[in-house]
Amino acid sequence: MSKKPDLKVNLGAIELQNPVMTASGTFGYAREFEGLVDLNRLGAIIVKGLSLEPTKGNPPPRIVETACGMLNAIGLENVGIDVFVKEKLPFLQTLFPPIFANIYGRSIEEYAELAARVDELEAISGVEVNISCPNVKAGGIAFGADPNSAFNVVKAVRKKTSKQLIVKLSPNVTDITIIARSAEEAGADALSLINTITGMAIDIKTRRPKIANITAGLSGPAIKPVALRMVWQVAQAAKIPVIGIGGIMTAVDALEFFIAGATAVQIGTANFVNPHTTLYIIDGIEKFLVKKKIDRVADIIGTLETNNQHPFE
């Protein structure tokens, strides 16, 4: 193959120059990585989760390293939508990749209001809705743990924005495909999964939790097999694009997700280990395609063979 392989993929109406995105909460507002990463090479950038008002987050300690991963209970600390528009957006709108605003609320009304605010921002290409947050009007159960709640919040957001709508799914459910179908029915353009898995760590000397919040979200390589399985299930159950998240550290990891059915991937915890990871993965995907003489990355999406056939060997 003489020419470079085509890395472009489509997320609904948005074309990405490559399928490597940054995961919300692990890449700040992008400027934090400006001196380390060529931001314009990324497929898309998803900024730190936004709320209507500034949020301080949880008290420390709120990050603990674990075997093959990390626990975090940051508590969705962020500057709020007003400060984001004034201080963060001017830099973001100078970048080439599409920018997605990750939003969250504690009620459907908050989600809807945030979506309306983001819809006014021309520099933002899409919205990623975090439905792993507790619904204060329903006893604290996460919106993403109940198909009806998920449907209602996505429908409310859909009414308030014409931008591309990604719904980020929680793995802390019995059957993630049920939630996925509810989000799709409510108007989602794409689904991203998985968010962190609830876990905890204990200090045996003090007999106290290592995280002040007691429980926290587990991310990193430890959750990759679970994420891969859920992406495969959702890719078969949904008709809209799926974005894989969870323990992706190398190009090989990303390729597994594509073969399982993901159209794109988000890189999260790996950014803390090596801030260059996103670029290494982009380069690695290209090298794999060249080696296997595959013209387009899109050609391997959803090609998992379950009858002992191995098309790339």
Image (cartoon, helix red, strand yellow):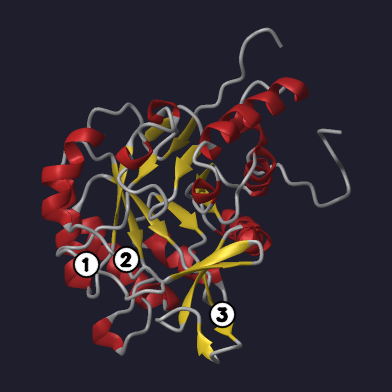
Q: Amino acid at mark 1?
A: Thr
Q: Is residue 293 visible?
A: no
Write down the quadrant of residue 33 in the picture. top left
Of labels 3 and 1, earlier in sequence is 1
Question: Does the CB distance between marks 2 and 1 fall below 8 Å?
Answer: yes
State which quarter of the image contains the N terminus. Answer: top right
Q: Nearer the viewer, residue 255 or 215?
A: 215
Look at discs 3 and 1 and give the one toward the viewer.
3
Label 1 secondary element: loop
Write down the quadrant of residue 259 in the picture. top right
Q: Is residue 223 visible?
A: yes
Q: Amino acid at mark 3?
A: Ala
Q: Position of residue 113 (x, y in %)?
A: 14, 62
Q: Position of residue 239 (x, y in %)?
A: 51, 51
Identify which residue is drawn at 13% across, 51% down.
83
Identify which residue is drawn at 42% across, 59% down.
168
Provide the residue designation for mark 3. 201
- Distance from disc 2 to disc 3, alpha carbons, whole Å, reads 20 Å
Provide the residue designation for mark 1. 55
Provide the residue designation for mark 2. 76
Q: Nearer the viewer, residue 166 or 199?
A: 199
- Distance from disc 2 to disc 1, alpha carbons, whole Å, reads 7 Å
Identify which residue is drawn at 16% across, 55% down.
81
- Distance from disc 3 to disc 1, alpha carbons, whole Å, reads 25 Å
Q: Nearer the viewer, residue 172 or 206?
A: 206
Look at discs 2 and 3 and give the one toward the viewer.
3
Q: Furthest-top residue in view?
A: 2
Q: Amino acid at mark 2?
A: Leu
Label 3 secondary element: loop
